[in-house]
Image (cartoon, grey):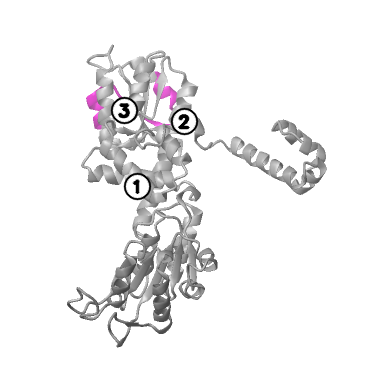
Amino acid sequence: MMENDRKLLVIEDDPGLQTQLRWCFEHYEVLIAGDRESALKILKEHHPPVVTLDLGLPPVADGTSEGFALLEDILAEAPHTKVVVVTGNNDRKHATRSVAMGAYDFFYKPIDADLLSLIVNRAYRVYELEAENRRLSEQHRESPLEGVLTASTSMLDVCRTIEKVAPADATVLLLGESGTGKELLARSLHALSARSEQRFVAINCAAIPENLLESELFDYEKGAFTGAAKQTPGKIELASGGSLFLDEIGDLPMPLQAKLLRFLQERVVERVGGRQEIPVDVRVICATHQDLPEKSRNNEFREDLYYRISEIMINIPSLRDREGDAVMLGRVFLERFSQQQGKKAYRFSKDALAAIETYAWPGNVRELENRVKRAVIMAEHRQITAKDLELGGSALDEQASFNLREIRDQADRQAIVRALSHVDGKVSHAAELLGVSRPTMYDLIRKFNLKT
């Protein structure tokens, strides 16, 4: 978006300041409002991405009640709009209150054209990035992998693999930590296959007691055991023609592993208490968070079954390894739960965004979803903070830098430290590894204050 295509709403009742602000942003399409009513009218007609708001508005020009009321109206009408509040000289109390209500940033009078332009330009950039994230989210919602939202390269590679593998009938093993979306991807495999019109049957091998799991999977005949009053088909037979998802396959008891292996080899089942072999046509998808080769070495999982279920293996990255996804997914969940709870749109504070970005998310997407849902239910203000998310209030300075020079310096420092560690601190050898001259290497060591 070019600057002269951008709309900026300036809410200011002082004619002199109106002129000054219009001059500050001569490359923008500046819209001027002098009171609450005209500001809301312009907001609804023109949808400006960024607004500057002077808190002192008529009819109480020397107070802030009208300004705060208008701020609340703007955020309710256009929750994605970035509002830069303009307040009195060093009026920290009102500035803090504005940001707590949901304002993007604040600026103290008197007007410094360069500094205010910097704040407004940054607000536009954030608005554009968020708009792009929302656009990507909408694209993913409409994709065949329904419900899979991502912008990270690693997860996009998984999605492409799912699309390639889905049409085949090969047995697939999904590997990933708890909460990474294994069942969601299993359903995508089914939805993109030729079996999509048939049943998708899921069973969690860790959630059902061992004495019941066999009958759940393999059916039983009437009278096979006490309480078996009628013939009952199991999950495998129910999935015939469709897909069978065996979640947490690593927890399958050893006796049932042998029976499952026989089914995978011969594609027939024999009900508990029965003698007739029943052919079943089903696509099998398995998932686990466990290290199956290690379990095989410890005689806890059959090696031959492992090779049978892993015709195709797909590793699902954890949320902490999906760069940028935590913040994007957090915004999606925030909007979804706000609507579900029938509440006005919420937004994340800066410390919440920093906390979401820096937290390790051991419970992955499921943990993020649960924390956002709880925050929306419990929040007393329109802005969700790190405290609301129970993330300990991460400081803003912990947030990953967007400054290219800082990012390059960090990468250079890491490369130098790594090279020196590989050659036992010998500067000349490290310089050769890095492809730089020895004097340059010494300059870099001094720059980053490294010891050799």
Residues in magenta?
A: 20-41
Report the front residue among 126 and 257: 257
Q: How many marks?
A: 3
Point out which mark residue 395 bears.
2
Residue 30 magenta-drawn?
yes
Q: Is residue 18 visible?
A: no
Mark 2, residues whose alpha carbon is within 10 Å: few (<14), some, or many (≥20)?
some
- The residue positioned farthest toward the front in the image shown: 226
Per the image, the residue denoted by label 1 is: 369
Q: Position of residue 367 (x, y in %)?
A: 38, 47
Q: Earlier in the sequence, mark 2 or mark 1?
A: 1
Chain-order first, disc 2 or disc 3: 3
Estimate the spatial distance between the alpha carbons at disc 3 and disc 1, rounded to whole Å. Answer: 23 Å
Residue 232 part of the magenta segment: no
On residue 101, which mark appears? 3
Q: Quadrant of the C terminus?
A: top right
Q: Quadrant of the N terminus?
A: top left
